[in-house]
């Protein structure tokens, strides 16, 4: 070690807010699915900036588009029209289910969910929400009220507007809660932070019907699953569910902070100017970046690539689960959102840092789920190298 990492640590202690439990790692640069730390060590990155760098780190087309837009016009007030916003909105309308043609841009997934919840209140005139246990929808106060993990909500009890929660995947339990006072049900098509949980086949369409029966709206939170991640443009395509409002983020920006909610004509028309927004909502640099990311995903066939590579991971991890049945409980996910569920948290806590020590970055979530959400264009040989390492670490731990 050259001491560069320690130097970063010492600087951080003096000036940075201690709100994150960090890994002992300071990254310096990236290209494709590789990143290098300040000491020059190379890692295969299966976290992709937390499911964000969907076309790999520093893709040349993205870097070029950002540089071009930066030299043209980066930011305007939202009270003027601008074409980069429309270029992106048109792309989203093209890949979204047919009737979700209006998009509203925000800077983060949480803000997109805030907007979606507010829109549901406007449209229905109701104020009750139903959400699911172990969900994750962001850390702003509104979104947090629907976040089904008590540890996040508890410190703010009394100031968050709490949803009613049903276990994820349990349609009958949700049906009990969905009544004529409910403005919206908010749900992830696959729970990401909650441990890569895939619901039963009829769950989402069942929620849709229960909402329709009482005039509530269905908000599908695709912040983590959007834009090709699960081997479809949107994860809703796996079940054919038709939400009223769709939120997305992360991978759409490829590393630039942008998210959105989109809705049907009928629902979006309920929004009143001033209801939602922000200085950077629809920032031109971010919109240009996201439109470029979507173009690369489309031109390079990365949605299909995610499906094929995801199947490959499932096959390899499926074999690992058979060989190591005492350590691996299950393999879950779709496309390039995969969870390797280990049997106990102690084992997971050992596997996670050891994998990093051997040059592969993965995420540990829900205590014992090793989550992989790499770039949609990760080269197959690099993916295989990374899987070799994960499998070897699980086998020896
Ligand atoms: N919704 C889901 C499903 C997420 O996974 C996340 C973040 O992980 C969010 C919302 C919040 O997004 P952001 O961190 O951009 O606010």
Image (cartoon, rainbow, N blue to C red):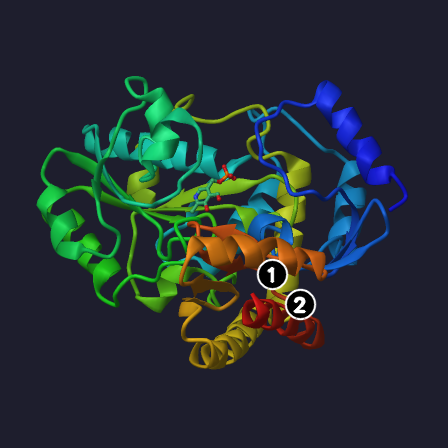
**Residue 90 position in % (x across, y down):** 52, 51
Can the viewer see residue 37 in this picture? yes
65 to 127, vertically: above or below: below
Residue found farthest to the right: 2
Q: Which residue is mark 2?
A: 378
Occupied quadrant, residue 237: bottom left
Residue 138 is left or right of residue 128, and the answer is right
How many circles with numbers are drawn on the protein? 2
Q: Which mark is residue 374?
A: 1
Q: Nearer the viewer, residue 105 or 13?
A: 13
Can the viewer see residue 55 in this picture? no
261 to 226, vertically: above or below: above
Occupied quadrant, residue 308: bottom right
> Decide: marks 2, 1 in contact (CB < 8 A)?
yes
Q: Which mark is residue 225?
A: none
- Which residue occupies 70% across, 71% down? 382
Q: Residues within 10 Å of mark 2 (few under 14, many from 20)?
A: many
- Which residue occupies 40% across, 37% down? 113
Q: CA distance from mark 2 to mark 1?
A: 7 Å
Q: Nearer the viewer, residue 282 or 259?
A: 259
**Residue 291 position in % (x across, y down):** 62, 51
- Which residue occupies 53% across, 25% down? 278
Residue 233 is left or right of residue 375, and the answer is left
**Residue 68 position in % (x across, y down):** 80, 44
Q: Residues within 10 Å of mark 1 (few under 14, many from 20)?
A: many
51 to 137, vertically: above or below: below
210 to 34, vertically: above or below: above
**Residue 381 position in % (x across, y down):** 70, 77
Instruction: State the SS at label 1.
Output: loop
Residue 349 is left or right of residue 9, and the answer is left
């Amino acid at each position: 070690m050259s001491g560069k990492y320690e130097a970063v640590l010492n600087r951080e202690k003096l000036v940075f807010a201690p709100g994150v439990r960090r890994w002992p790692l300071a990254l310096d640069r990236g290209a494709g699915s590789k990143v290098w730390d300040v000491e020059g060590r190379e890692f295969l990155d299966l976290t992709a900036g937390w499911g964000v760098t969907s076309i790999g780190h520093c893709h040349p087309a993205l870097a070029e588009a950002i540089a071009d837009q930066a030299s043209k016009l980066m930011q305007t007030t939202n009270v003027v029209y601008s074409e980069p916003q429309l270029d992106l909105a048109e792309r989203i309308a093209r890949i979204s289910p047919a009737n979700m043609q209006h998009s509203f841009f925000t800077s983060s997934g949480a803000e997109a969910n805030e907007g979606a919840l507010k829109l549901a209140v406007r449209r229905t005139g109701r104020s009750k929400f139903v959400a699911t246990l172990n969900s994750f929808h962001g850390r702003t106060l509104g979104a947090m009220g629907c976040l089904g993990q008590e540890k996040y909500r508890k410190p703010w009890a009394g100031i968050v507007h709490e949803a009613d929660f049903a276990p994820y995947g349990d349609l009958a339990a949700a049906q009990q809660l969905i009544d004529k006072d409910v403005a919206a049900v908010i749900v992830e098509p696959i729970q990401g932070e909650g441990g890569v949980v895939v619901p039963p086949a009829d769950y989402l369409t069942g929620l849709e019907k229960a909402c329709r029966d009482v005039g509530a709206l269905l908000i599908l939170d695709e912040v983590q699953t959007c834009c090709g991640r699960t081997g479809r443009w949107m994860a809703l395509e796996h079940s054919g569910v038709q939400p009223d409002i769709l939120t997305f983020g992360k991978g759409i920006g490829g590393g630039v902070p942008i998210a959105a909610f989109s809705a049907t004509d009928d629902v979006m028309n309920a929004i009143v100017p001033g209801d939602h927004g922000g200085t950077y909502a629809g920032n031109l640099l971010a919109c240009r970046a996201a439109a470029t990311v979507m173009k690369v995903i489309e031109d390079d066939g990365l949605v299909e690539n995610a499906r094929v590579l995801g199947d490959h991971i499932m096959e390899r991890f499926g074999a690992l689960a058979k060989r190591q049945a005492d350590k691996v409980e299950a393999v879950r996910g779709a496309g390039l959102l995969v969870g390797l569920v280990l049997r106990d948290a102690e084992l997971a806590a050992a596997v996670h840092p050891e994998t990093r020590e051997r040059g592969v970055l993965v995420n540990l979530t829900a205590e014992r789920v090793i989550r992989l959400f790499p770039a949609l264009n990760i080269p197959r040989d690099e993916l295989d190298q990374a899987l070799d390492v994960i499998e070897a670490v699980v086998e020896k731990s």
